[in-house]
């Protein structure tokens, strides 16, 4: 084992794990070298594939036994959902889509996106419950621009 300044800072357990990885990598290289000398499908080639598979399996088991890797990888992951919707043929480009969004937002900001039915419902609610200062429109129909209504 090579001694260098980085290796001296490792704990005994870390050096053991490093040695385990180094030995397995060396064995893996030897198996791969032997596989190159065999024709695919021959008994020797298939034995090398099996040996490589066993080596990988034993290495995983050893890491699990040491507690370095969870036995159930679903424990180490979290589930999240990311929904994406694609609507083909609505806009020709991203710029056209952005322009449509900007136009819609401008209408909402100006209050032009409300229909007559929305206004009737809003007036009915204002009559029943009074005027609200948390309205989503800029000014109420009974207020002058710049005037604030406080209850």
Image: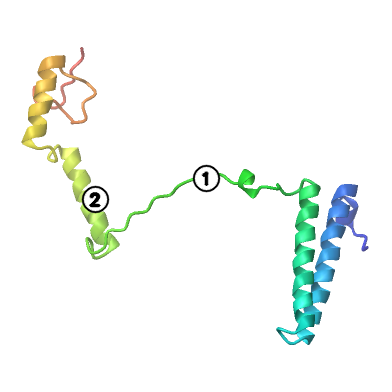
Q: Quadrant of the C terminus?
A: top left
User: In the figure, is residue 98 to the left or right of 127?
Assistant: right
Q: Where in the figure is residue 89, as x and y percent of width and height?
A: 23, 64
**Circle number at residue 39:** none
**Is residue 61 visible to the viewer in this orientation of the structure?**
yes
Write the residue at 16% across / 15% down.
129
Quarter of the view holding residue 123: top left
Q: Are marks 2 and 1 in contact (CB under 8 Å)?
A: no
In three-dimensional space, the C-alpha distance between marks 2 and 1, rounded to whole angstroms, equals 31 Å
Which mark lies nearer to you, 2 or 1? 1
Write the residue at 22% across / 60% down.
90
Q: Nearer the viewer, residue 43 or 14?
A: 43
Query: Furthest-top residue in view?
Result: 151
Secondary element type, mark 2: helix
Q: Quadrant of the N terminus?
A: bottom right
Up/down of 89 relative to 14, above or below: below
**Residue occupied by mark 2:** 101
Q: Where in the figure is residue 144, as x and y percent of width and height?
A: 10, 24
**Residue occupied by mark 1:** 79
Q: Nearer the viewer, residue 114 or 69?
A: 69
User: In the figure, is residue 73 to the left or right of 86?
Assistant: right
Query: Furthest-front residue in view?
Result: 43
Q: First in sequence: mark 2 or mark 1? A: 1
Q: Where in the figure is residue 63, as x and y percent of width and height?
A: 78, 52
User: In the figure, is residue 9 to the left or right of 133?
Assistant: right
How many residues crowd around disc 1 within 10 Å: few (fewer than 14), some, or many (20 or more)? few
Up/down of 96 relative to 42, above or below: above
Write the residue at 77% across / 82% down.
43
Q: How is the image coloured?
A: rainbow
Secondary element type, mark 1: loop
How many residues crowd around disc 2 within 10 Å: few (fewer than 14), some, or many (20 or more)? few
Write the residue at 71% across / 84% down.
40
């Amino acid at each position: 084992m090579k001694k260098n300044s980085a290796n001296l800072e490792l704990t005994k357990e870390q050096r053991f794990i490093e040695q385990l990885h180094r030995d397995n990598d060396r064995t893996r290289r030897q198996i791969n070298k032997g596989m190159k000398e065999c024709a695919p499908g021959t008994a020797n080639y298939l034995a090398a594939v099996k040996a490589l598979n066993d080596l990988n399996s034993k290495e995983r088991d050893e890491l699990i036994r040491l507690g370095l890797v969870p036995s159930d990888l679903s424990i180490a992951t979290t589930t999240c959902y990311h929904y994406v919707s694609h609507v083909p043929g609505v806009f020709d480009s991203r710029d056209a889509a952005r322009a449509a969004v900007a136009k819609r937002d401008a209408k909402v900001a100006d209050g032009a996106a409300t229909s007559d039915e929305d206004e009737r419902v809003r007036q009915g609610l204002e009559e029943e419950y009074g005027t609200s200062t948390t309205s989503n429109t800029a000014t109420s129909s009974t207020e002058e621009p710049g005037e604030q209504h406080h209850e």
